[in-house]
Image (spheres, rainbow, N blue to C red):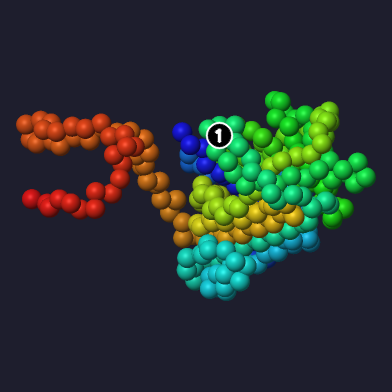
Amino acid sequence: MNKKTTSICVGSFACALQKANDILGPDRPWTPTTDPTSCAWQKRAIIAYLNITDDGRRDMTSIEGIDGEASFDHEKLNATLQKFGVDIRLDPFLPTEFGTIGLYEVGRDWLIEGNSDISIRLADGGRKVPGFRIPNNNRKRALDVIAGLEGNPTVRFYTKQPRDRCVVIMRDDGEYDDFELHERAVRMEEESREGESIACVGVQVPMVDLNHQPDISRLIGLSTHKEEDPLDRFYIGQALQQNIFQMDHMGFLAKSATALGLLSGAQRHGPPPPDYIVDGPFIVAVVADYGVEFAAHIWPDTMRDPKRTYTLG
């Protein structure tokens, strides 16, 4: 299986969730759905939200690079998303529905500009990709390489912004699902603080140009209510995120937008059941009233558009 790049931005997500307070008021707990396919994932999302907002007490818009908005007008929110430079858009709201967006954008220059004339041959398959190199300069502490979790080194590149001491880059062969990815990154970065330094004269790393829309639709059904009035409940009915990350020899840009649509409990009849998705090899059969006439076991080599070379009888 070819592994695919994944991404998650808890900063923009937490801001979008917190902006619901602008319309609903503060101190409303969030409750996961009872749907077993989404419950565990939503619990992870709630934990990430509570951790980054200090149990909801930290105003996310007070943090540099983070902003948000709440409105009953989906066109107003979509105009902000367009101006921010992302493609995600909210669907129109019913009269009592509203939406929120969270925006995150941080760009930094490396403390020492690197060399861009680097090609890196990947260990798996030998493919070459463009990269850059930053030297380990003794006069300026430009980077650290730390022995990390399960033998995967953590590379810290220091930036010209003193408060942003590093971008953490982990080498890991695993695949992680959105908020699980966030948990993994937090754990690896925390463990690396106690790790031993690895001697090196510099670091070479691939350049990155990521534009990714993670599927956060499992947030649909996550609800909030007043503690004194459980019937005053609102549910997430739309959930979108788009993440951009670019990194080269000069620095990095991280950018994310999260858009949520919320609807009142009075309108909700439960989230629609998810599609059943055939996402692997399958047997297809042509069946007449007397039995199976034709069968094939379909694998990815024949999963393609036939372009209608046939006619229907």
Residue 284: % across, % down: 22, 35
- Left or right, 154 with respect to 6, comes to right
Which residue is at 62% across, 67% downward?
84
Determine whether the residue tagged by mark 1 lies in a helix, strand or loop.
loop
Which residue is at 70% across, 64% downward?
67
Residue 18: % across, % down: 68, 57
- Left or right, 257 with respect to 237, comes to right
Q: Nearer the viewer, residue 246 or 105?
A: 246
Q: Nearer the viewer, residue 276 or 298?
A: 298
Vertical relation: 151 (above or below) 257:
above
Disc 1: which residue: 126
Q: Nearer the viewer, residue 176 or 68?
A: 176
- Left or right, 79 with respect to 94, comes to right
- Left or right, 111 with respect to 131, comes to right
The answer to whether any part of residue 256 appears in the image is yes
Residue 219: % across, % down: 54, 49
The answer to whether any part of residue 44 appears in the image is no
Residue 164: % across, % down: 82, 51
The mark tally for this picture is: 1
Which residue sits furthest right? 139
Quarter-of-image position of residue 252: bottom right
Q: Nearer the viewer, residue 135 or 290?
A: 135
Amino acid on which the number 1 mark rests in the picture: Gly
Which residue is at 73% across, 32% downward?
153
Which residue is at 50% across, 57% downward?
237
